[in-house]
């Protein structure tokens, strides 16, 4: 039990990587608190965790809405009086060349992927500073380090997260708070399925194109990232600070040919 009794907050854990992480954390003894806009999806993750004897709660939260975040953190503090881990996972995609991206869509992806991490962290940090202990994991992407066609806005958000993570680490190291980022490659989740449907006439054939970008034979599974999140959340990574951990099937390691 690598997270026994730890209060772990995960945003966007109704589906995909967040849902897989909630289950892995609960299996390791964590008390999981999920913040989601899709409360139905979050509730079914909670039910699944409880059915297996784990501990989990779900709250309707939009990470761009400060009032809903404040209410969530108040509830979490009333319930547990502490916060050990925050996984800023919620995120949305944005596809298009820079000149094709409308202002509304630019603002939306910035709001969820960057401002959302700022707002939730801002509300959680006072508790961690007071405890002089905590772990924050921010969801970046391998796209923070390499260019990819038609992803300018999304890439900008994930690059911002990686930079923010390093500066946060510098500021909060004196309080024994570790801040790291995850940089996944292509993980097969509803997020990627949606992107494939919107971007390609033949989504199945497109999967082969995605595989050609990486060194590993298969696309990533949500559990691959969840296990990396577990490592960053647990004390096994106590000497890992301000790092960006690639979980990308070798996309950023080099070209296969
Ligand atoms: N899937 C990939 O290939 C991949 C690769 C690199 C990084 N990521 C990042 O991982 C994270 C999770 O991705 P995923 O593939 O699991 O996505 P997903 O779409 O499967 O799940 C994301 C969840 O976040 C929730 N969410 C969206 N906006 C929200 C908001 N404003 N407030 C609260 N919750 C909100 C959604 O309802 C959804 O349940 C994202 O930040 C994404 O950018 C994904």
Image: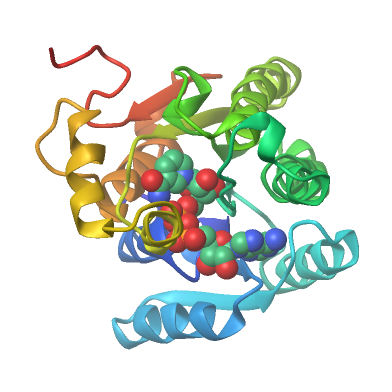
- Residue 93 in the image: state x and y as whole percent: 56, 49
- Residue 142 in the image: state x and y as whole percent: 42, 27
Whether residue 14 is situated above or below residue 257 in the rendered picture: below
Residue beneath the point at 65% across and 19% down: 163
For residue 164, side relative to residue 207 (left or right) = right
Task: Report the quarter where the C terminus lies.
Answer: top left
Depth check, front residue: 62 or 150: 150
Residue beneath the point at 37% across and 78% down: 49
Whether residue 39 is situated above or below residue 226 in the rendered picture: below
Depth check, front residue: 196 or 34: 196
- Residue 185 in the image: state x and y as whole percent: 34, 35
Residue beneath the point at 35% across and 38% down: 231
Whether residue 211 is situated above or below residue 144 in the rendered picture: below
Depth check, front residue: 233 or 63: 63
Furthest toward the front, the residue is: 201
Furthest toward the right, the residue is: 67
Displayed quadrant of residue 228 = top left
For residue 29, side relative to residue 134 (left or right) = left
Residue beneath the point at 18% across and 31% down: 212
Residue 5 in sight from this viewpoint: no
Displayed quadrant of residue 164 = top right
- Residue 175 in the image: state x and y as whole percent: 71, 26
């Amino acid at each position: 039990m690598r997270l026994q009794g730890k209060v772990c907050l995960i945003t966007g854990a109704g589906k995909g990587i967040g849902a897989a992480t909630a289950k892995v954390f609960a299996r390791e003894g964590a008390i999981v608190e999920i913040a989601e806009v899709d409360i139905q999806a979050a509730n079914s993750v909670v039910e699944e965790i409880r059915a297996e004897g784990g501990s989990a709660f779900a709250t309707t939260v939009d990470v761009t809405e400060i009032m809903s975040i404040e209410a969530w953190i108040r509830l979490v503090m009333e319930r547990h009086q502490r916060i050990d881990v925050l996984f800023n996972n919620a995120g949305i995609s944005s596809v298009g060349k820079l000149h094709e991206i409308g202002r509304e869509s630019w603002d939306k992806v910035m709001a969820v992927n960057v401002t959302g991490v700022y707002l939730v962290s801002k509300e959680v940090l006072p508790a961690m500073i007071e405890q002089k202990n905590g772990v924050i994991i921010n969801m970046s992407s391998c796209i923070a380090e390499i260019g990819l066609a038609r992803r300018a806005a999304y890439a900008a958000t994930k690059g911002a997260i990686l930079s923010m993570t390093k500066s946060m680490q510098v500021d909060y190291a004196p309080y024994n708070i570790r801040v790291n980022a995850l940089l996944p490659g292509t993980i097969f989740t509803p997020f990627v399925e949606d992107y494939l449907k919107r971007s390609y006439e033949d989504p199945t054939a497109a999967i082969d194109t995605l595989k050609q970008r990486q060194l590993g034979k298969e696309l990533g599974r949500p559990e691959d990232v969840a296990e990396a999140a577990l490592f960053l959340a647990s004390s096994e990574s106590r000497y890992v600070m301000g790092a960006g951990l690639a979980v990308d099937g070798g996309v950023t390691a080099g070209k296969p040919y």
